[in-house]
Amino acid sequence: MERHRGRLSNSSPEDFQAVESISQEIEGPTICALSRAVASDIEACGRALAKARKPRIHTGIGVSDIHVMGKFRDEKYGRTLEEKRARILQMTVDAVKLARSYVGDVEFYAEDAGRAEPAYLFQMLEAAIDAGATVVNIPDTTGYAVPEQFGALIRAICEKVPNIGRAVISVHCHDDLGLAVANALAGVLNGARQVEGTINGIGERAGNAALEEVVMAIRTRADYFGFETGLDAREFYRTSRLVADMLGMAVPANKAVVGGNAFAHSSGIHVDGFLKQRETYEILRPEDVGFSQSRVVLTARTGRHGLRDRVEKLGYSLSQGELDQTYERFLAVADKKQEVFDEDLMAILHDELHPVPDTFHLDYLQIASGTSTIPTATVRLRARDEVKQGAAIGDGPVDAVCRAICQAAQVSARLSSYEIRAVTSGTEAMGEVTVHVEEGDRKVMGRGRLDRRHRGQRQGLHRWP
């Protein structure tokens, strides 16, 4: 399976330079350059691959009647369907022979094979192999095929193309109907030995077969497929995130194999079974594809077993009564949030198991800040019947508030971190604020939510052990 393929033509100098650079620097994998069945494009591929250790040229042409009559409508290719087919067959032979004059490894693609008339497809593949093709690529270019049909097509190629034993069959499936991976695997079952895919399934329109899904399906169901790929699947997660970052295309949380939730459990029944024996709800090991570990997502559906497991991992040991008490508070918080984080859970534990009455009550807070104003804050606190006030300047308005509160409360704490993020969308968006404060060896975290009118609600405040 080639690791890089770039389409080259006389009008794409950037692709030419990319393939040329990769050819010079990369050892080991086959470097493949893609072109149309056009002499100038094939020649460009040959020049770009001149210094490659294992070069391949991948050239091809449309084979379905839709492509033949649509893309080759000019009368120079013939006037009738049969005349155009004959002309395209000759173009196939000429393109493959020219490519073979540059490299010993030539792949030929029969574009839109998924909608082609089988007899003509078989004739084209036979001609390409006789001309020197070492790999024949069967693309479902529009994602039109279904697995049973596509598998039958690959099987028919093995049976009906006389010289197919001299070439490797490759499949290239698109995901317009969400069947790219299924079609690619059906191809493997019926004789294909090369699968073309992309990381995260990126590609034209709805994308291509996701390489990570194909590989892990073959590995996980080795009992069914009976093959192996030799790829290091532990690089999938890291590579997936690299591709996502470079292209600005986020990986959906529910994406198979590499999605953020691929190894996350939240349903109470699933969590209970997973914690008792991983294999009850996981057929893949997260470390096999580059994740550090599975995780239990705390939601309103998690259940007591999942909550107890997370509490114990945080270092707390609860009696049954304490667990029941904590679980009730946990459900109240989980009903308001999509996910309950460890910080929330620790705040719940602190409030429920070690309740401490408020020492101070905030009477008022005033902040002055602007582009030409030094951030200043004034606060008034009430401690029982005693009123305390403080005023301070800071590096920013939040820092000024923290200093003013410390002055009024007569403590020497320092604001170490302040984070705010939107947790809903629209003009009425809610914001979630997390504040970290330090005083000597003590670290305190507070979390709260605030709407656009600055009406806040405390979620929790606790001291870290």
Image: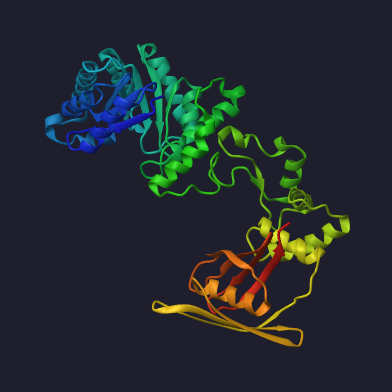
Residue 103 location (% of width, % of height):
26, 17
**Number of numbered discs present?**
0
Residue 166 location (% of width, % of height):
36, 11
- Which sits in the foreground, 170 or 31? 31
- Which sits in the foreground, 73 or 188? 188
As displayed, is residue 220 above or below residue 410? above
Quadrant hosting residue 208: top left
Residue lying at 22% horizontally and 35% vertically, measured from the top left: 69
- Which sits in the foreground, 19 or 208? 19
Residue lying at 72% horizontally and 59% vertically, measured from the top left: 346
Along the horizontal axis of the image, is 377 left or right of 138? right
As displayed, is residue 295 above or below residue 209? below
Residue 266 location (% of width, % of height):
68, 50
Along the horizontal axis of the image, is 105 left or right of 400? left
Q: On the rendered image, what quadrant is the N terminus found in?
A: top left
- Which sits in the foreground, 326 or 45? 326
Q: On the rendered image, what quadrant is the C terminus found in?
A: bottom right
Residue 196 location (% of width, % of height):
41, 30
As displayed, is residue 188 above or below residue 242? above
- Does any portion of residue 177 appear in the rendered image? no
- Does any portion of residue 231 appear in the rendered image? yes
